[in-house]
Image (cartoon, rainbow, N blue to C red):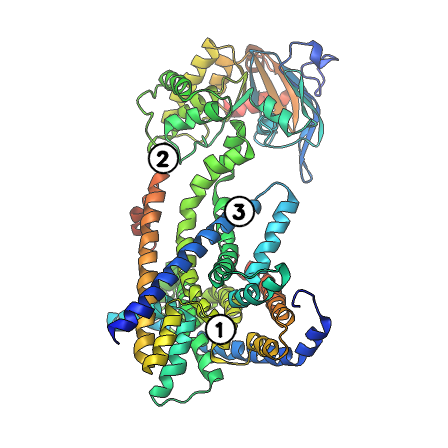
Amino acid sequence: MNGNWDWSAVADFMPRFWDGVLLTLQVLALGSLLSFSLGLVWAFGLRSASRFVRWPVNVVTEFIRNTPLLVQLFFLFFVLPEWGVQFSALTTGTVAIGLHYSTYTAQVYKAGIDAVPVGQWEAATALSLPAHRTWFAVILPQAIRRIVPALGNYVVSMLKDTPLLAGISVLEMLQQARLESASTFQYTEPLTVVGVAFILIAYPASLLLRALERRLVR
Amino acid sequence: MSAENAIPAPENPAATDELIRFDNVTKRFGKNTVLDNLCFSVKPGKHVTLIGPSGSGKTTILRLLMTLMKPEEGTIHVNGQQLYPTQGEKQLREIRKNIGMVFQQFNLFPNMTVLRNITEAPVRVLGLSKDEAEQRARDLLDLVGLGDRCDAKPTQLSGGQQQRVAIARALAMRPQVLLLDEVTSALDPELVAGVLDVLRDIARTTDITMLCVTHEMNFARDISDDVLMFDSGRVIESGPPEKIFGDPEHERTREFLGAVL
Amino acid sequence: MSGGLWQHWILPGIWTTVQLTVYSALLAAVVAFGIGMARTHRLWVVRFLAGVYTEVFRGTSALVLMFWLFFVVPGLIGWAFVPMWAAVLALGLSYGAYGAEVVRGALASVAPAQREAGVALSFTPWQRMRLILLPQAVPEMIPPFSNLLVELLKGTALVSLLGIGDVSFAAYLVRLATQESAQIYSVTLVIYFVIAFLLTRGMKAVERKAKAGIGIDVKAQISGGTR
């Protein structure tokens, strides 16, 4: 009798649900940090003067960006131990998400920097500013306005991809719902709660980002 | 002559031979009043030119008639039928069929050839057969001097050629009224004459009613039966072109003509 | 890897992945155009409902939606989906919501004067949409649709978690059989990359053709760009 909504099943699910929320947010926070920093490395590689750097970085990031996160997740989960690297499922999942999304954030950084008008570089050169001053005083403050909202959008995307970690039994929200269902045989309530939870987190976040975008990108 | 009643409007619109009639029409954009309690009327077959400084509401009159915007107050009749306040989308569409418009920026459809730009509405809206519509389109393209450009895309034409296609497109619907909204303002100077010649031709050889907003005063003098001088959303003076251009009564009219002529 | 594994698991897996991609993309396209056009409707109720659809399906996780359709909906409506169709529905509905934003944006980017010219020729709203707005908006949609199509292809891998025999599921089975993870998962990633590459190339060709139809030269556009 899955057809009838049972509030007590919802209540029973709550302890597990909150554990799942916490773990999801943890994966999201660490995965975001990893994708932000690794993406910066890729972006510098893509802007490198040497094509022996540019070309391989381009191939690697394009490959990662055009293949499924889920398969990458399994690759890391099953292959790393064969190579003698022992990560927990949680660490593997966080690394996989961070790595996958770093190829998106790299594009965000690159587009943000490319969007700064050429005249700004020329003006900095004309003023004989040293390279680090050019970057930190002129280019980055202008690029950041475009970068921040776009990064935010990818954080929301990452959030919606965290359930993939259920595939390697990380106890995020979806996996908690599956375990709950497996023990109570009630699928409706836990899965619905998790589905609604995603909307309740993602919608305000995207509203916030749109407002931020309006303020920063004029 | 009072400002509101540049052309005194008779009491009963249906009983007259007026084609277009504005009664106490007011149009605002936010706090800005572009048409202020405007009354005027146009008889069938007449060529009326609206002149005046920019922002005086001339284009707004054409856009109201084309149902591209609504007035806040007042009534507008076309052919004795009430356009505003609206009597429903169906009647709007019926009235709209009698009105054609040529825009400042041509607004040809870039996804269609020149020929299809002209045939599409007669086929889809008037229900003409494809052959009839194409014959009509070819005749009109000959009239505007572009008989050999049927298969071109609009982007392959000059501005002047595009505007002549746009005129043909409007005429293909055989409207009673043709609205001309600063049709030469977006053109390079050397292309203006060709477009105006086509319009002079149409004014001379057809009995279509024309409502024309323009800054080309010589053209206005040539084709107009009546000239309405606008300022701040009101008609401040009207009359035959010889009078308005030759012996204007109003100080503002003299200033304006002094500046543009 | 032996030929038998290819023939029995991987090749059928690729075929399933391709089918999933095609069916989901078709459903997503229908949803994208329907909802995207509804968001430009003159009645606010229609715009509002279409907006709610977009926010809900963009807000939810495709995998959770898939599980929900697979495990919960049968209890609600009394019959179960074939797993394949639960997957197609989940992918099509959620990627359709992203596509709706693309359609809406492209329609909004058509010059308002084009709509006005349509009014002046007495076209009905639907005729304006079909004859004037869509033909001009569609070429603009193709590059973002191309990106979405690759995302959708990647999304089809989720179905392996429902036990549907796509190429990811085949990889899982092969790993169990051979215990060689690196090899099979590398091959699987390359398969996805090749399909994504072909899709992107195909969409580029479609874009060139569509833009030529409204008088835009893509090559000139690119060479005339910032680079």
The amino acid type, in three-letter code, at marker 1 is Leu
**Same-chain status of marks 2 and 3:** no
Q: Is residue B164 visible?
A: yes
- For marks 2 and 3, give the CA distance: 30 Å
Disc ID at residue A99: none
Disc ID at residue C34: 3
* Mark 3 closeness class: few <14, some 14–19, many ≥20 residues within 10 Å: some
Q: Is residue C211 above or below residue B190?
A: below
Question: Which SS class for mark 3?
Answer: helix
* Mark 2 closeness class: few <14, some 14–19, many ≥20 residues within 10 Å: some
Q: Position of residue A169 (x, y in %)?
A: 50, 80
Question: Which SS class for mark 1?
Answer: helix
Q: Residue at x 66, y 64 (%)?
A: A3
Disc ID at residue B155: 2
- For marks 3 and 1, give the CA distance: 29 Å
To which chain does the residue with label 3 belong? C
**Same-chain status of marks 1 and 2:** no
The amino acid type, in three-letter code, at marker 2 is Thr
Of B60 and A22, nearer the camera is: A22
Task: Kindly indicate the quadrant of the structure image that contains residue A119.
Answer: bottom left
Q: Quadrant of the N terminus of chain A?
A: bottom right
Please identify, in this view, whether the residue under mark 1 or under mark 2 is nearer the observer. Answer: 1
